[in-house]
Amino acid sequence: MGAGVDAYNGYGQRGSFHVIERQMSAAVELFPVFARAHLLRSWAGTVDVCPDASPLVDRTPYRNLFLNCGWGTGGFKATPGIGWCLADTLANDKIHPYLGPFSLGRFVTGALVDEHGAAGVAH
Amino acid sequence: MQLITCPWCGPREETEFRYGGQAHVTYPDDPAALSDQEWAQYVFFRDNTKGTWAERWSHSAGCRRWFNAIRDTVTYQFHAVYRLDEPKPVIS
């Protein structure tokens, strides 16, 4: 069974019980035989999400400290690409063009990358 | 499922509620005087507390009223709920 992102701040690092409960009840409704199944595992962890649900990849005001976070809405498929872009950024000490939209400064300029729902997941 | 106590309706399931983020973020006294950086701070930047803090909730599928809560972000335990016109309770 999967789980969604909690809609509230949390460091519980446990599954979302309200999501699991609803998913289990839907599964049992569809397949009553599942009522005899034991739930062995569910997802748990911390999901880092920006206000616009897009990642944050940028240098920081601190020398040699870079950010690559906020991938909580779908980082799996982007991992190889962003690794390449970040490596290019570190090697040349220049922000890779692809990373421009994902800067810290977008919250000041207002140029948000509003990707809520783009990954097709209920975040 | 966790129960959250609405100050008006009593304990209800958490799926009836909508989250409103950090509480007691005051609107700027002179909005026109703010720089872009200061607006960004007001609109987007919040404390990131691991532990007890104050936050806003709305009983969106119930009475639809907003209230504040003191909650632990690690255990998810609610230490207090209080109306918007009530002062922030002191939690030891």
Image (cartoon, grey):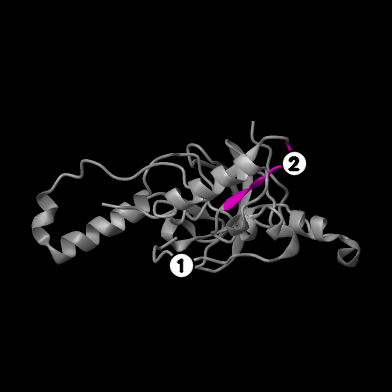
What type is the residue that disc 1 sits on? Answer: Gly
Q: Residues within 10 Å of mark 2 (few under 14, many from 20)?
A: few
Q: Residue furthest left?
A: A33
Give the answer, above or below, for where A78 lies relative to B80.
Answer: below
Q: How far from the left and from the top, in percent, is residue B35?
A: 86, 60
Q: How far from the left and from the top, in percent, is residue B80?
A: 58, 44
Label 2: element kind: loop
Q: Residue B32: which disc?
A: none
From the image, tell me which residue sits under label 2: A61
Residue drawn at 75 percent across, 53 percent down:
B41
Q: Mark 2 or mark 1: which comes first in sequence?
A: 2
Q: Which residues are magenta?
A: A56-62
Residue drawn at 67 percent across, 44 percent down:
B47
Q: Quadrant of residue A111?
A: bottom right
From the image, tell me which residue sits under label 1: A117
The magenta stretch spans residue A41: no
Q: Residues within 10 Å of mark 1 (few under 14, many from 20)?
A: few
Residue A66 appears left or right of B63: right
Give the answer, above or below, for where A44 lies relative to A30.
Answer: above
Query: Where's the C terminus of chain A, which quadrant?
Result: bottom left
Q: Nearer the viewer, residue A108 or A36?
A: A108
Q: Nearer the viewer, residue B71 or B7?
A: B71
Q: How far from the left and from the top, in percent, is residue B12?
A: 43, 57
